[in-house]
């Protein structure tokens, strides 16, 4: 469930907020701001510090100092840490337009264009990751530190993606458009491609020395790989090499065709038959 602060956050998310610069001899208290703008400013500062230092390494005092406000001001807007963490996810939901990924590709879903559905979802995610790599680092910190934000993100976003996209896949399977594979496995394979691509680009290979392609091309190829695989047309419909027959099965098959097993033939030769 979205927190009670989501609507308030969404109304102020478009406001451009600059962190006040502390001048020599001045107080840490920054210039006066409207309540919504101040709240959003503190939220953005907190996200930046969390993504850089992790949750264990960031205190509310440090957030207040970086935001140019008092620690009391931080608690005035976010009475508890849980409220602050929930507000982070709500703010990301506003930036990302929706908590339901299917709204991004609603038209493609309506016309049952599977390629456009997966291509659109992939492109939306890649563009979002490129514009906000800070949030990826923050989520990694939360998972590694077993922080409650990781669980909150799982419940608010990840589980919703699995349920929503999995439901679409299941419906298309019933119509015979997608092969009968566990929908959650399809979702995981799809998310895996997109997330790994973003993580490599944003964390380890920012110069794109390993693979330098546009988000548009990456999204198109990911959708193509998911729906059509990597096998060539000459490979036919074979999904796996045939299983080798056991010796017992081979003997049984030979007998059913009126053939003597090789071992029996050898024994007959030695006995002179």
Image: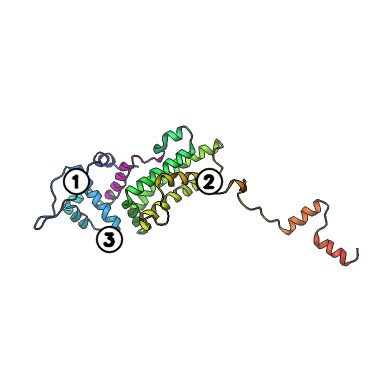
Residue 226 within the magenta-colored segment of the rendering: no
Residue occupying the point 43% across, 45% down: 217
**Is disc 1 surrounded by few (<14), some (14 to 19) or many (20+) residues within 10 Å?**
many
> Which disc, if any, is residue 38?
1
Task: Choose top left, top right, bottom left or bottom right for residue 263.
Answer: bottom right
**Is disc 2 surrounded by few (<14), some (14 to 19) or many (20+) residues within 10 Å?**
few
The answer to whether residue 232 is left or right of residue 55 is right
- Whether the residues at callouts 1 and 3 have beta carbons within 8 Å, the answer is no
Residue occupying the point 80% across, 60% down: 262
Question: First in sequence: mark 1 or mark 2?
Answer: 1
Question: First in sequence: mark 3 or mark 2?
Answer: 3
Tell me where residue 118 appears, x and y as whole percent: 45, 42
Q: Residue furthest bottom?
A: 270
Tell me where residue 26 appears, x and y as whole percent: 9, 55
Identify the residue under disc 3. 57
Disc 1 versus disc 2: distance between alpha carbons?
46 Å
Quadrant showing the C terminus: bottom right
> Which disc, if any, is residue 182?
2
Stretch of the chain drawn in magenta: 83-101
Name the secondary structure under disc 2.
Answer: loop
Name the secondary structure under disc 1.
Answer: helix
Please say if 61 is above or below 36.
Answer: below
Question: First in sequence: mark 1 or mark 3?
Answer: 1
Tell me where residue 130 appears, x and y as whole percent: 34, 49
In this view, the residue in front, 234 or 146, is: 234
> Which disc, if any, is residue 224?
none
- Whether the residues at callouts 3 and 2 have beta carbons within 8 Å, the answer is no
Residue 85 within the magenta-colored segment of the rendering: yes
Q: Residue furthest top?
A: 111
């Amino acid at each position: 469930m979205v927190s009670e602060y989501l609507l308030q956050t969404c109304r102020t998310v478009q406001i451009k907020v600059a962190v006040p610069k502390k001048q020599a001899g001045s107080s840490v208290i920054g210039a006066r701001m409207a309540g919504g703008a101040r709240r959003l400013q503190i939220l953005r500062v907190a996200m930046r510090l969390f993504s850089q230092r992790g949750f264990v390494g960031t205190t509310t005092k440090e957030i207040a100092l970086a935001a140019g406000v008092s620690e009391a001001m931080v608690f005035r807007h976010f009475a508890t840490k849980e409220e602050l963490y929930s507000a982070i996810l709500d703010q990301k939901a506003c930036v990302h337009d929706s908590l339901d990924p299917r709204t991004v590709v609603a038209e493609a879903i309506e016309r049952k264009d599977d390629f456009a559905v997966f291509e659109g979802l992939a492109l939306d995610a890649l563009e979002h990751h490129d514009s906000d790599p800070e949030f990826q680092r923050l989520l990694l910190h939360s998972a590694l530190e077993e922080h409650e934000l990781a669980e909150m993100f799982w419940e608010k976003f990840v589980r919703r993606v699995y349920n929503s996209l999995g439901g679409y896949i299941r419906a298309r399977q019933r119509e015979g458009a997608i092969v009968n594979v566990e929908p959650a496995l399809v979702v995981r394979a799809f998310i895996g491609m997109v997330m790994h691509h973003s993580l490599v680009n944003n964390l380890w290979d920012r110069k794109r020395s390993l693979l330098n392609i546009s988000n548009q091309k990456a999204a198109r190829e990911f959708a193509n790989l998911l729906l059509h695989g990597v096998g060539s047309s000459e490979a036919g419909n074979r999904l796996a090499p045939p299983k080798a027959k056991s010796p017992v099965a081979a003997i049984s098959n030979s007998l059913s065709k009126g053939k003597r097993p090789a071992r029996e033939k050898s024994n007959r030769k030695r006995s002179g038959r």
